[in-house]
Amino acid sequence: MSERHYYYGTGKRKTSIARVRLYPGDGSIVVNGKPVEEAFPWEQWRTLILQPLKVTETSGSFDVVAKVEGGGVVSQAGAIRHGISRALVVADEKLKPRLKQHGLLTRDAREKERKKVGLKRARKAKQYTKR
């Protein structure tokens, strides 16, 4: 059995990393071996993931197979979105301007700031009392 041809893209967001493969197909989406409805039960997470396909109007022409690890659910959804965007550019270079226009190719570089010594969180300090 020969391996089907696919387009690959790596997506990242916070501490999540998604390895995304786009196969020519009918639009099914599988995340970590589960259908997207099972992996991301909340509609807004699925909307986030499907954004690159909607923007480029390629919703029914690719099957998406994603493996994602690390981070939380929203972070993973963002990583998959980034991976799909990058894979679409590999599939068709003409889609790049539209994806770039919607900011889907830019990696969201915001990371959690580390906790500082003497503070409760990264920036929250104890309440200051003058007297």
Image (tube, helix red, strand yellow):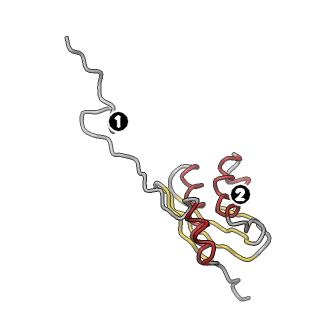
- Kindly identify which residue carries mark 1: 121
Q: Locate the C terminus by quadrant.
A: top left
Amino acid carrying label 1: it is: Arg
Label 1 crowding class (10 Å Cα cut-off): few <14, some 14-19, many 20+? Answer: few
The spot of residue 119 in percent (x, y) is: 28, 33
Residue most extreme to the bottom: 2
Which image quadrant is residue 118 in?
top left
Which image quadrant is residue 61 in?
bottom right
Alpha carbons under labels 2 and 1: distance apart: 34 Å
Residue 9 placement, left or right of 4: left
SS type, badge 2: helix
Specify which label sits upstream in the sequence, 2 or 1.
Answer: 2
The spot of residue 48 in percent (x, y) is: 64, 53
The spot of residue 70 in percent (x, y) is: 50, 56
Q: Residue at x 30, y 29 (%)?
A: 125
Q: Locate the N terminus by quadrant.
A: bottom right
Q: Residue at x 71, y 57 (%)?
A: 36
- Kindly identify which residue carries mark 2: 36
Residue most extreme to the left: 131
